[in-house]
Amino acid sequence: MTFLSLNPNTMSGHSHSLTEFNTLGVAQNCQQLTRLNSYDSIIEFCQAYDDKENSLLVLGGGSNLVLTDDFDGEVIKVESQGVKITEDDDYFYLSVEAGEDWPRFVETLVNQGIGGFENLALIPGTVGASPIQNIGAYGVELEKFCDWIEFYHLSDDTVKQLTAAECQFGYRDSIFKNALKNQTVVLRVGFKLPKQWKPVINYGPLKDFNAQTVTASDIFKRVCEIRQSKLPDPNVIGNVGSFFKNPIVSMTVYQELLKRYPYIVAYSVDNGMKLAAGWLIDQAGLKGHRIENVGVHDKQALVLVNHGGATGKQIIQLASFVAAKVHDTFGVELEVEPRLIGKHGEIEFHG
Ligand SMILES: Cc1cc2nc3c(=O)[nH]c(=O)nc-3n(C[C@H](O)[C@H](O)[C@H](O)COP(=O)(O)OP(=O)(O)OC[C@H]3O[C@@H](n4cnc5c(N)ncnc54)[C@H](O)[C@@H]3O)c2cc1C
């Protein structure tokens, strides 16, 4: 098969709209968009593409990026499908194509009695994007059950595999955002899920479950309920989920903050204390704050929303305003979570 066989989905011209391909719903265009629906078509495309490192944007579900300009290059949308499951006495081994829809994948696993990822229910996007920022929610991160990642290495023109240990996973971080930034197209992800399932229920609203009787399906349902009640649906109002990472501060800084703000929300982590960015934004008085057609969500201050017709630049202006206000109030730096994509590729956030 060749990617040219996907001609009906290949659209030329600088005016191809990406509005429906990013969950913020900002109206930016690109020169060309190619939708690739199989492992082989992704490889063929990559082999034939001749400006791999400079002008290629890889898109999954578009739920973790902000397009701040028209993209001066080509966009590929990864839509390959397929899940292979094998097992031995102790584990299920899964090999999953990058274009699989993450929420559907998790639901299918839970329905088949394969537990592990129920805490990551309803996170929008594709399986191929899941290792890029090591997705996480309710006390579980992807790295817990990730076995390997297979990817096309654009600078070397080869297919490679990394073990999970080699991916340098961290909090919303991995090698794909650092040493291998913009050099890879993830093709498949391997997972290894123990048959001896253990619930993770030590996080906030999951705490009232009984560890002896709870099932993966119970947790899945509860997580879905909470997310649906707390987070705005991108199909209704454009957003990318959490816009900022929860900042990690030293114990000394935390103790100082605690004196001034006895109710500050924080969690202990290896290298200090992780502060709840949503709480900081809320306390800075910005919940529901609106500047023209962009705003801080009125129920969840960590989420910035497009009230209709917003540009990526307006979203970034609002993000800068929020970060500056939090810095003035608490002396804490906020870092953005989604990738910011400018005319020629990824750009940095400068607060
Ligand atoms: C309502 C909402 C709630 C969310 N909740 C959470 C949450 O609880 N936890 C969490 O961690 N995230 C959350 N997110 C963020 C988002 O869902 C995840 O980051 C998700 O993994 C992004 O997947 P995607 O396919 O949409 O990636 P995209 O937005 O399409 O891409 C994100 C980045 O990954 C790159 N990329 C995508 N696919 C590939 C590929 N195949 N190969 C190489 N690079 C690729 C892109 O170039 C881009 O840099 C949420 C988003 C929304 C809108």
Image (cartoon, grey):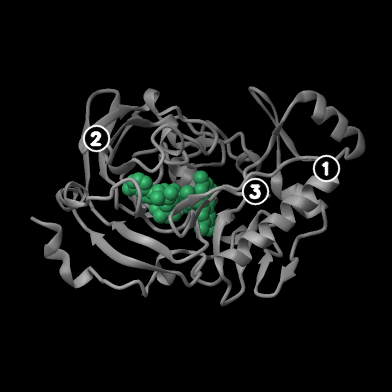
User: Tag on residue 350?
Assistant: 3
Give coordinates of residue 245: x percent, y percent. 62, 43
Amino acid type of the residue tagged 2 in the rendering: Asp
Q: Residues within 10 Å of mark 2 (few under 14, many from 20)?
A: few
Q: Is residue 111 visible?
A: no
Q: Residue furthest left?
A: 1
**Mark before the other along the chain sequence, 2 or 3:** 2
> Element type at marker 1?
helix
The residue tagged with tag 3: helix, strand or loop?
Answer: loop
Amino acid tagged 1: Phe
Give the mark toward the camera: 1 or 3.
Answer: 3
Q: CA distance from mark 2 to mark 3?
A: 32 Å
Could you say where residue 56 lies in the image, as x and y percent from the top left?
33, 53
In this view of the protein, can residue 155 be seen by the observer? yes
The mark found on residue 330 in the picture is 1
Q: Amino acid at mark 3?
A: His
Answer left or right for 236 relative to 183.
Answer: right
Q: Mark 2: is the Cβ under 8 angstroms from ligand 1?
A: no
Would residue 173 be found to the left or right of residue 107 on screen?
A: right
Asked where in the image residue 160 lies, by quadrant, the reply is top left
State whether residue 47 is above or below residue 93: below
The numbered dot on residue 243 is: none
Residue at image point 27% right, 57% down:
79
Do the numbered discs 1 and 3 sit on residues whose CB atoms are within 8 Å?
Answer: no
- Mark 1 vs 3, N-terminal side: 1
Q: Quadrant of residue 113?
A: top left
Q: Nearer the viewer, mark 1 or mark 2?
A: 2
